[in-house]
Amino acid sequence: MFKAIRVTILLFILGMVLTSTWLSQARSTDWNNSLWVKIYPINADGSQISADYIQQLSAEQFSGIESFVSREVERYGHDLKRPVRIELGSLISEQPPALPDAHSKLTVMWWSLRMRWWAYRVANPQDSPAPDVRIFVRYHAPASDFLLENSVGLQKGMVGIVNGFAGRRYDGSNNVIITHEFLHTLGATDKYEAANGLPRFPEGYAEPDRKPRYPQRFAEIMGGRIALADDDAVIPRSLKYVLIGEQTATEIRLLR
């Protein structure tokens, strides 16, 4: 009897968690209310350059994200005045769980659970109440021969890890990556080729019907780059050169 009671209680808790997760995800894309997105800086390389940059960070440096989402939400016919509200959190001193080398479903699932628990544990002490989406930005000192690790956004748990460069000149490109991962938390999928990073045609192009096709003027946010030719594309300098394409808009329920 006691075993049956324990199982029932565990199933009830699991059901509550699943229901809460589903409701949070549904509300995040109904575009009826503002989404609260909190950004937490992390000194990824322990350098003084990154530390100094983080020290001077302000929420204003992420205002381009709010403007971009507001512009695109309006372009798709919604009248929500401030669809995203950005807040800057305090420095997080602990690094997130490393992305797994293996890509088996079980390994990725285990990493996802660890990631969500880590995000809750390190951010919860400064969150009251908790934001809708948590984005952790790992800053690195700029170097010409340094390649940033992959960034990631999880719809389950609505948490993202972004790798960016420490420096005001990189604020625009960092915001592009942050927005890309933020939209992952809302259900958007990648629209570029994993092998070479080139945007996929047509869904990864901001203006797939443009004639002539090249050069494109904008990047599709989940395509990630502005296509200049079939085999050439560049990362946009800021969100001024980025659009949300129709497939992405459908995935996040901007287009219904």
Image (cartoon, grey):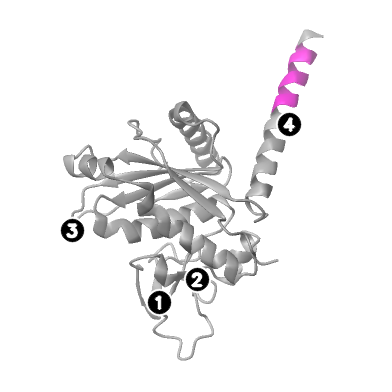
Q: Nearer the viewer, residue 172 or 181?
A: 172
Give the x, y percent position of residue 19: 72, 37
Tell me which segment is drawn in magenta: 3-13
Image quadrant in which you'd find residue 31: bottom right
Looking at numbered disc 1 in the image, what kind of residue is underneath it?
Answer: Ala
Disc 3 from disc 4: Cα separation: 49 Å
Q: Which residue is mark 3?
A: 144
- Report how far apart the C-alphas of labels 2 and 1 lie in the structure: 9 Å
Q: Quadrant of residue 189?
A: bottom right
Q: Earlier in the sequence, mark 4 or mark 2?
A: 4
Q: What type is the residue that disc 2 sits on?
A: Gly
Residue 113, visible in the rendered structure: yes
Residue under label 4, please give it.
15
Residue at image location 74% in from the left, 19% down from the top: 9
Q: Nearer the viewer, residue 19 or 149?
A: 19
86 lies above or below 217: above
Which mark, by number, is residue 227? Answer: 1
**Residue 41 point in image, percent of width and height:** 35, 41
Q: What separation in Å lies between label 4 and label 2 (alpha carbons)?
A: 37 Å
Disc 4 element: helix
Q: Residues within 10 Å of mark 3 (few under 14, many from 20)?
A: few
Q: Report whether 215 appears left or right of 220.
A: left
User: Residue at the spot x=33%, y=39% of the render?
Assistant: 42
**The N terminus lies in which quarter of the figure?**
top right
Name the secondary structure under disc 2: loop
User: What predominant SS class does the magenta segment belong to?
Assistant: helix
Residue 1 is one of the magenta-drawn residues: no
* Amino acid, disc 3: Ser
